[in-house]
Amino acid sequence: MKAKCSLLLFSILFYNILIAQTNVCYTYDKAGNRTNRTICLKSEEASSDSVSIAKIPITENLGEMVITLYPNPTKGQLMVQITHMPDNTMGEITLYDLSGRLVTVQNTVNENTMLDLSVQPLGIYVLRIRVGGKVSEWKVIKE
C-alpha cells in the first residue's frame, strides 16, 4: 500500500513537471532597459496565443509624435514606427555600437521604417532617431 501511494505521488509530480513549463519573463522600461526578471509558468492554453515579450512594442512620446520600436531584443529585423509625424518632416536614424562607432545611417524616415541588423554582430547598440529637430535615443539589443 505504501509503495502504491509513493508511486502515485511520484507519478503526479512527474506529470506536473512535464506539463508545467517555466519561463523567465522580462519587463522593460521605455528606453529598452530591462527592469525586472521573474519566473512565470506557461500553461498550455496561454502558449498557443501568447505573445513573446520580445514582440511587445516599446513606445515613447516625442511631442505630438509617438515612436514605437519592436522587437527589442531583436534577431535582425527592427521596426521603427512614427505616428503623427508632420508632413514634409525630415528625419534620420543612426545606429552606434557601444564604443561610439557609427554602424549605419538611414536618412529617409517614414512612418514605418525597417532596419536590418542581421549582418551586425550580437551586442548592444544605441539607436538615435531624429525627426523634425527632436531626438530620441534607444538601447537596442541584437541577439
Image (cartoon, rainbow, N blue to C red):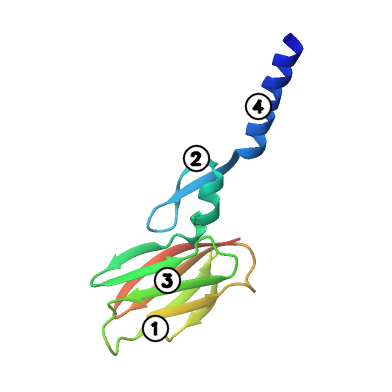
Closer-to-camera residue (13/100): 13
Q: Are marks 1 and 2 in contact (CB under 8 Å)?
A: no
Q: Which residue is mark 3?
A: 128
Of badges 4 and 2, nearer the viewer stands: 4
Q: Is residue 61 above or below residue 134?
A: above
**Mark sitting earlier along the chain (1/2):** 2
**Mark sitting earlier along the chain (3/4):** 4
Kind of residue sitting beneath label 2: Thr
Q: Residue furthest left?
A: 64
Q: Is residue 4 above or below residue 104?
A: above
Q: Are marks 3 and 4 in contact (CB under 8 Å)?
A: no
**Mark sitting earlier along the chain (3/1):** 1
Label 4 to label 1: alpha-carbon separation: 55 Å
Numbered mark located on residue 12 in the image? 4
User: Which x, y percent locates residue 115?
Assistant: 52, 76
Q: Residue at x 67, y 37 (%)?
A: 18
**Mark sitting earlier along the chain (4/2):** 4
Question: Label 1 crowding class (10 Å Cα cut-off): few <14, some 14-19, many 20+?
Answer: some
Label 4 to label 2: alpha-carbon separation: 26 Å
Numbered mark located on residue 38 in the image? 2
Kind of residue sitting beneath label 4: Ile
Q: Is residue 71 left or right of residue 7?
A: left
Secondary structure beneath disc 2?
strand
Numbered mark located on residue 110 in the image? 1
